[in-house]
Image: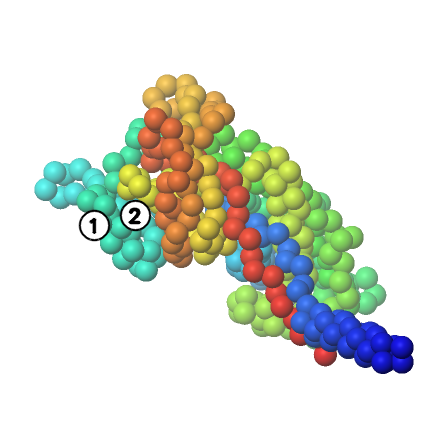
Amino acid sequence: MEIKKIGFTLLKSGMLIVTAGLMMGNQSCQQEPVAPRELKRMIEMGKVISPKIDLPQGGSFDFEFVANQQIYGVLQKSEHFALRYAPPVESVPDMPSRGSQKTVNVSSNDRTMLKAFAANGGFSEKAQYSTEAECMINLPSSRIAGSVNAFEMIGGAGVKIGFTQAGPINVGGLSNVGIAIQWAQLDLSMLATHPLTQSVLAATNVSSKQTKTQVNFTLDVGGFSVGPSAYYQTPLAKVTQKALTTGAEELYKQINSKEEWYSRVLMNHDTHLVMLGGTNVNAKIGDRFNIYNELYYWEGEPCRSRYYGGGSSSPVATIEIDWVGDEVSRGKVVDQTDENPVLGAKVKILKLAPDAPVVKSAK
């Protein structure tokens, strides 16, 4: 009887030790949840317009220049947008025929791989583009622009430099050196438009109340009159960056609520399709996309007249990404109807490949 009791006690103790060990293992190696991955929208940046800032003792500061410089930096760092600087397909003069041919305008690494894909598939790199979809390939999902409505630098005793919606602030009588600036505030409007119809997809206003920031620095007017480099060395640059970042985030929220992400087919290699968007949009191997041959409605000649819209209700093919480049990705056709995907066909997300969970050891 005592032997059975001792054996049971030892067994119970062993189970407790194993259970404790498992608990310690769970504590020392935990998987953190991964936020759902999203693809960046391919956009083009228009222009941020702004009045100049009148400076004491004459001269002005080109505030529009610094605003446009900063918006590119803001969008480059964004988790939602991928900037497009040049059209993916460009026409180059063909001297013998006195016409033009099309060439793919992507990174040098992507061009090397596209040539290899074309050679293996028996296709020329110079793809033939269907009339109805040709102009769609070079279009971004939206174009973004902005306007600085007011920018005020506020010092003691009611000193102000800059401009409001009513016009430039009179700076007559102010000293040309050593102006103490305590606060800065900016009012900014931004909008995103459809690349073909120019209809407004999203619009937002970032008010002076949202951007008012304590800066506490001494304004060197002489340095400002030389060029914009002095501006970036002051706390004012953070004020404009804050306004531009807030505006871009709000545009994204509005666009995302109205329109799903999409891209375009750049090349068709029969068993594989090449689409616009690579690491620049956060695409990964294993992502699946549906391909749609859309029917477009034009006032007259396709791509050369007023566009009224278009769409398609069902996909003609599905691809799974097996190679990701800088600006393009290649996908294997895993499903297809009797209809062949055309170049310029719309690409929509079916399912993004799951990201590996982050394993973190507990201390």
For the point 56% across and 60% down, which residue is it? 356
Q: Residues within 10 Å of mark 2 (few under 14, many from 20)?
A: some
Q: Secondary structure at mark 1?
A: helix
For the point 16% across and 43% down, which residue is it? 94
Label 2 with label 1: CB-CB less than 8 Å: no
Q: Quadrant of residue 153?
A: bottom right
In which quadrant is the N terminus drawn?
bottom right
Work out whether residue 301 or residue 339 is closer to the camera in this orientation and state it.
Answer: 339
Q: Position of residue 54 (x, y in %)?
A: 63, 58
The answer to whether any part of residue 225 appears in the image is yes
Q: Which mark is residue 119?
A: 1
Q: Residue furthest top?
A: 299
The answer to whether any part of residue 217 appears in the image is no
In which quadrant is the C terminus drawn?
bottom right
Q: Position of residue 190 (x, y in %)?
A: 62, 45
**Mark 2 lies on residue:** 104
Q: CA distance from mark 2 to mark 1?
A: 15 Å
Q: Which mark is residue 258?
A: none
